Image (cartoon, rainbow, N blue to C red):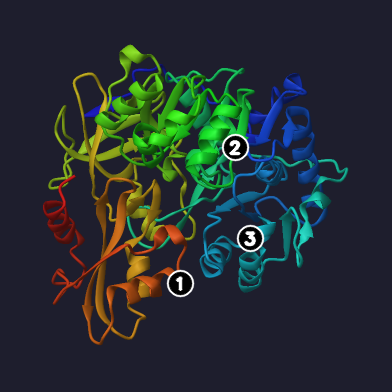
Amino acid sequence: MVFKSPYADLVIPDVGVPQMVYQHALQYGEKPAMIDGLTGRTITYKQLYGGVQRVAGNLAKRGLRKGEVVGIYSPNLPEYPLAYHGVALAGGIVTTANPLYTADELAYQLRDSGAKFLITAGPLLEKAIPAAQQAGVQEVFVIGEGEGATPFTKLLTEAEPPQVAINPAEDLIVLPYSSGTTGLPKGVMLTHRNLVANMVQTLASGVNLQQDERVIGILPFYHIYGMLVILNLCLYRGMTIVTMPRFDLEQFLKVMQDYKITRANLVPPIILALAKHPIVDNYDLSHLKIIMSGAAPLSADLAQACSERLGCIVLQGYGLTETSPVTHVNPEDPARIKLGSVGVPIANTECAVVSLETGNPLGVREEGEIWIRGPQVMRGYLNNPDATAQTLTPDGWLRTGDVGYVDEDGYFYIVDRVKEMIKYKGLQIAPAELEAVLLTHPAVADAAVIPSPDEEAGEVPKAFIVLKGPATAEQLMEYVAERVAPFKKIRRIEFVEQIPKSPSGKILRRVLVQQEREAKPT
């Protein structure tokens, strides 16, 4: 059975992302587009629009050609859209990297995506420079100050943007990296059409963004959620985005108060703090009207607690990097919100619930894997036809790897994951990546990593380890922490005699996950 969106189908504008985002920029003029929440540094819409054109022109002068890749390795800063949309306007493809990545993790992404240039921020240069050298990047640009890189301001000198013919349905705009349902991070090929479609789909599906709103830019722009729902959508609607380079609860609350933030796109760990942390009472958040949650499941109880404490609407949506990202959302009408549900399919989106055992489509309130079809679905994984074939069916369905069901009203609920990914504070961690690091330790004979339930983070990585030599849990956790980004650290270890495996040698993670859930009820 196919479940269709309750919203009418739309015609998707046949334009590129920069043309879509900035079509009203000049009429917004001197209105603040981007504000640095910590310093107050402001870029107006007029400045932003002109800056994007100059960045495009100067990148073209330096040899960027249509279809070539530029990496952005930066925290959320007002300059982020200058870099992102400047590359896109020049006909380039952006690959966005997590600023917490180590030099080796960044080098992997730059090499895999074939990045020609890299744009970064001063504090990250000590990782960015060696990563760029490893990956054969031609030039590194730095926002702010730092040695060994070209100042980003050089890209803001007068220059006309090149005239590049974009085919929105075919030409890629961005390569965010996702582990999909399994394995190492893979470049997700998203076209201009994918992102433009998702913008209009979202706005036509009960998400009521208003020009006079101020939104907090705390979700990372390198992540598809922050990139599409905040950076692209809010600029298109003429809103003011107040950025923060990283999450600190007191700073976050102060920025929310001082800038009278009206809308916040958040993840469950931040919503947990807003619902329960005593320090929240010290700040005036009375301007906040709506919190949209995504990236990980939000329980009905937590949504209710946060809503009652702050006196605002709390709702959640659903999506994946592979779907640009939005596929489901609750309408912003309080009478139509179902807490605990991710909402209904957005416009132009079809969903199916498929049996894990038989592969047959299921009906109402029957649990299975969620499949999605719509114009926001990716082209595939970069240079990885096998992974693409495992995720996309020949008739255009995307297998999400998430288990859920649909109720009588067409609202969807996510209850489990088929895929092996760990969701730590909304960020994806591939178990295979951590297992590979553990197996390089001389004392480790075998290892398996799974998600372990955690109230604050949602899930944390837990390792089951078979030893062949002396080592403590602390030593092994430290060993991994030195080699991966901080959010990927293993936080729990259990020593075992053997790892459960299938006859073919594949780790039976679901067995370990089930054991863990039974030991730690959530």
In the rendered structure, are the residues bearing label 2 and label 3 in contact, judged by CB atoms less than 8 Å apart? no
Which labelled disc corresponds to residue 168?
2
Amino acid on which the number 1 mark rests in the picture = Glu
Q: Which residue is mark 3?
A: 124
In the rendered structure, are the residues bearing label 1 and label 2 in contact, judged by CB atoms less than 8 Å apart? no
Does residue 14 appear in the picture of this structure? Answer: no
Front: mark 1 or 2: 1
- Rounded to the nearest angstrom, the CA distance separating label 2 from label 3 is 33 Å
- Rounded to the nearest angstrom, the CA distance separating label 3 from label 1 is 17 Å
In the rendered structure, are the residues bearing label 3 and label 1 in contact, judged by CB atoms less than 8 Å apart? no
The image quadrant where one finds the N terminus is top left
On the image, the x and y values in percent for residue 242 come to 61, 33
- Rounded to the nearest angstrom, the CA distance separating label 1 from label 2 is 42 Å
Asked which secondary structure carries label 2, the reply is: loop
On the image, the x and y values in percent for residue 355 come to 16, 42
Front: mark 2 or 3: 3
Toward the viewer: 185 or 162?
A: 185
Crowding at dot 2, Cα within 10 Å, few <14 / some 14-19 / many 20+, comes out as some
Picture layout, residue 145 above or below residue 240: below
Picture layout, residue 282 above or below residue 360: above
Does residue 330 appear in the picture of this structure? Answer: yes
Left or right: residue 465 versus residue 72 is left
Asked which secondary structure carries label 3, the reply is: helix
On the image, the x and y values in percent for residue 19 come to 68, 31
Q: Would you identify the image quadrant in which residue 114 lies?
A: bottom right
Crowding at dot 3, Cα within 10 Å, few <14 / some 14-19 / many 20+, comes out as many
Q: Closer to the N terminus: mark 2 or mark 3?
A: 3
- Residue drawn at (13%, 46%) of the image: 358
Q: Which residue is mark 1?
A: 482
